[in-house]
Amino acid sequence: MSSAISSGAPRTETPPAPAATRAAALKQATAALHEKVDTAMMAGEPMSGRERYARFVAVQYRFHQLTRHYFGDPVLNGWFPGLAARERLAAVEQDCRDLGLDPAQLQEPPLPAPQGPEALARAVGWLYVNEGSNLGAAFLYKRALQLGLDAQFGARHLAPHPDGRMPHWQQFVAQLNAAPLAPEHEALAIEGARQAFERVIALARPLAQAG
């Protein structure tokens, strides 16, 4: 079978255009992993009832513990003004208690405080994933409301920021793009984001196996 598209000459793949910003580069480099996270999270049908939702919140709590040292880091707070106030760990912990979970049974050792430019670059990637999860929580929050949960009980960590999800995210993205990473450390930010997504996938995998 022949086609007008085929010229007989070997075809070459057109490389993707370079991303215009750091945020765009992170999104482009982690798109496949992001999709796997969504699949892993939803495989356990977390919004089908409070019991399954509680398992989902336990995963969220385990993940948010990992970056606790990042939100208090003075260098990162200089790059991301207001970063400390963005942390949702306390909200997730209270959601766990609301749902009858014992946070002491869900402990994860946090990542060490970043020391040096390479560790800070990886931390930027982790923060990108952490903050991005709040932007993507709009759908989940609406479903949580149907379970009788809200910003005062059980779904605090999914609730939108008072300024709105998108403005809050856009502020973070502007700070992300302006963070003073050296050119040779850009790949480490992508590495950090990939590590974060892979960790979420590993934490979420048992959700699909739970009865």
Image (cartoon, rainbow, N blue to C red):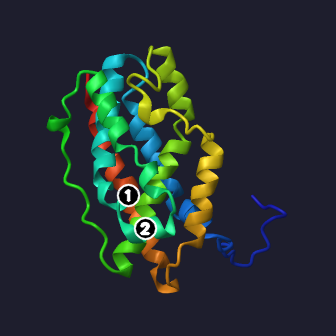
Separation of marks 1 and 2 at Cα, in angstroms: 7 Å
Q: Are marks 1 and 2 in contact (CB under 8 Å)?
A: yes
In the picture, the quarter occupied by the C terminus is top left
Residue 40 image label = none
Quadrant location of residue 6?
bottom right
User: What residue appears at the point 37 percent right and 79 percent down from the top-left corner?
Assistant: 118
Q: Which residue is mark 1?
A: 71
Q: Given the current orientation, which residue lies at the most extreme right position?
A: 4
User: What residue appears at the point 40 percent right and 37 percent down from the top-left corner?
Assistant: 41
Disc 2 packing (10 Å; few <14; some 14–19; many ≥20): many
Image-based side of 173 in relation to 39, left or right = right
Q: Is residue 193 above or below residue 168?
A: below
- Whether residue 144 is visible, yes or no, is yes
Q: Which residue is mark 2?
A: 76
Q: Is residue 162 above or below residue 98?
A: below
Image-based side of 51 in relation to 144, left or right = left
In the picture, the quarter occupied by the N terminus is bottom right
